[in-house]
Structure formats: structure tokens, C-alpha cells
Image: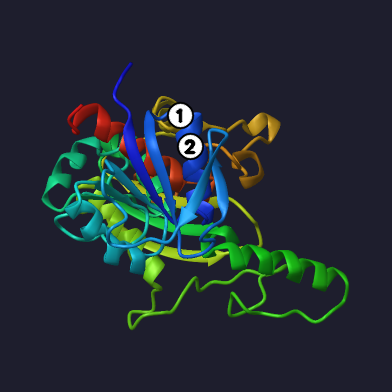
Amino acid sequence: MGKKWNIALVGATSEVGGQMIECLEERKFPVGKIIYLSESGVGEIMEFKGKPVVVEKPAHDSFAGIDIALFAAGSRLAKELCPSAAGAGATCIDSSSAWRMDPAVPLVVPDVNPHAIALYSGKGIIASPSCSSIQIAMALKPLHDYGRIRRVVVSTYQAVSSAGKKAIEELHFQTIAVMSGKAVKCRALPHRIAFNCLPNTGPIGDNGYTREEMQIVDETVKIMETEVRATATTVLVPVFYGLCQALNVETGKKISTAKAREILANAPGLKLVDDVSKNVFPMPSEAAGQDMVFVGRIREDESIKNGLNLWLVADNIRNGASNAVRIAELLIEKHLKR
């Protein structure tokens, strides 16, 4: 029997934390002991593989004997506790934005830059990118390897689950209210989301971009390890789960529609869904609960010499959780001592 690893899951009661639990179970990760840590739901009894696990309050001394600490909490808790966990001997895999742009912390998508994980030993922390950056990088990498990407324009259409549980509840209750002709209340989001689209997914900076838009730009460059020029617009849409993205890509070498389909159909982690004759394309309703990134609506951009348009869809919560667990798999396979 192979070695089993002791796991701490910080943010176990969050949407991402719940998906991490499912991924660990479904992928049969070799878990020895597992502890659930969360600031909400302390004392709540959850499960792992059918066995009860009591949710504990996270603290600096929570990580004794832990091999891997999976963080599915926010940036504040990650900044506060990752150094403590690493100091206790655990390797941290953080899904928040806390450490992503730290030059001493690798930002990893296993199908794109698995070699980067080797840099984790400096701080004992590995960052998992935003769900937006994960699926962008997974589509860009095989195209870049073939035709060298020069520039990408990203437009994202994000489900409310990207804004947390309260935003999910808000869409639910607002939808009922609108359909019933009742007044709509806005608490989790600044404007009504039911039957609406919000073109600002957070505070807008001095340059006119939201933090999330600049995050996509910065993370994409770091993951791709090349100065790809990028710009982004992010929009929150009235969908519970699923992240849709329209990508306009300019390459140094021409890539035909047929060649792009061939490249993307054979790329790891991607599934080509692009049957024009049957009107079959990627949709968030089809991607829910799956680890794959679905790609379709592939066509040449006729306004420039070497351009492509792509449509990407993935389950945003599942994709982020799965990426963190796959980093853990890569970590125990190639880097941690057995």
C-alpha cells in the first residue's frame, strides 16, 4: 500500500471547499487523516468518504502533522495562515488571490506549466489561479506551442457562484421576486442580477479596469511564462454555475479553423464541442459538475491576418477545486518525500 498523506482543508464549508472534498474522494487521493477548518460552521459535522469530520476553527497551531494544506478560504485567511502551515511542515495549495503574484510562489495549472511547481520549496506555498485564468491558459497553451500567441482579448460571462454563496441565494430570491412582481432586494451584489448583467465584477481602479480584469491579465502572463499581451472585460450574468469566455487570439503563425480544432481536440483537459451542422456548442448547463474545459465556436478572425475566435465554458467552482487537487497529485508524485 502506498503512502497516505495528512490533509487540512481550510474553508471546508465554502463552495470551493465542498468541491475539493468531492474531488479528493472521486480521484481517490491517498488521504490518511483529514481535518476540516472553517470560520463558519465550527462544530458542524461533515463527511469524508462516509466518515464524520467535525469542522474546527482555523488557527496558527492547526497544522501539526499535516502534509498538505488545501486553502479554499479567502485571501485574508490564506495570508494569515499559510506561513504558519508551511512553518509546521505542510505544503500549502492556495486557491485565493493572496499569493498568486508573489514572485517566490509558483502559479500552477498542471496541464500548462507543471514544471513551475518545483519552485514551491522557497515559501512552501503553491498558488492555484482564478478559474478564469485556468481555462484561458488551458486553451492558449496548445495554440501558443503551435503558432506563438501575440495578443488575446478576453470577455468573460461569470456565474454568480463566483461571488460566493450569498450571491447564489440572491439570484434565487431575486428571480422569484421578479417573477412574482415583488420588490427586489440587493444585498450581496450592488445591483439586481436576476434577468440582468453586471459589467463590473468589483471595484474599478484608476485605469478603468476591475481587479479581476487585471488579475486575468497578470495571471495569464505568469502562467504562460511569456509576454502575451492581454486585455479583459468581466461580466456577471444570471447563471448559478458556469464560466463562459469569448477569446480573440492573434498569433504569429497562421492557424486555420481546421488546424485549431485539431490542436484543441488533442489538448489535455479540453473537450472540443463544435458541431456546426447540429448546432452543438459549449454551454454552462452541460459543463456543470465536470472537470473539463469545453471549447467551441472556433473560427478565423477575418479582420486581422492571423486571428482566431474561441468560446470556452467550464464549471467555475469545480474547475478551481479540481486544479488545486491536481496540483496536490503532482506534488506527491514528483516532489514530496514518500
Could you say where residue 214 lies in the image, as x and y percent from the top left?
34, 67
User: Would residue 200 appear left or right of 65 to someone viewing this image?
Assistant: right
State whether residue 241 is above or below residue 210: above
| Element type where label 1 sits in the image | loop
Residue at 56% x, 47% y is 46
Residue farthest to the top? 1
Where, quadrant-wise, is the C terminus in this rendering? top left
Cβ atoms at labels 1 and 2 below 8 Å apart: yes
Q: Which residue is mark 2?
A: 23
Q: Which residue is mark 1?
A: 27
**Residue 143 visible here:** no
Could you say where residue 181 lies in the image, as x and y percent from the top left?
87, 76
State whether residue 185 is above or below residue 306: below
* Marks 1/2: CA–CA distance: 6 Å
Question: Which image quadrant is residue 285 in?
Answer: top right
| Element type where label 2 sits in the image | helix
Number of disc labels: 2
Q: How is the image coloured?
A: rainbow
What is the three-letter code of the residue carrying label 2? Cys
**Residue 324 visible here:** yes
Question: Which image quadrant is residue 142 in?
Answer: top left
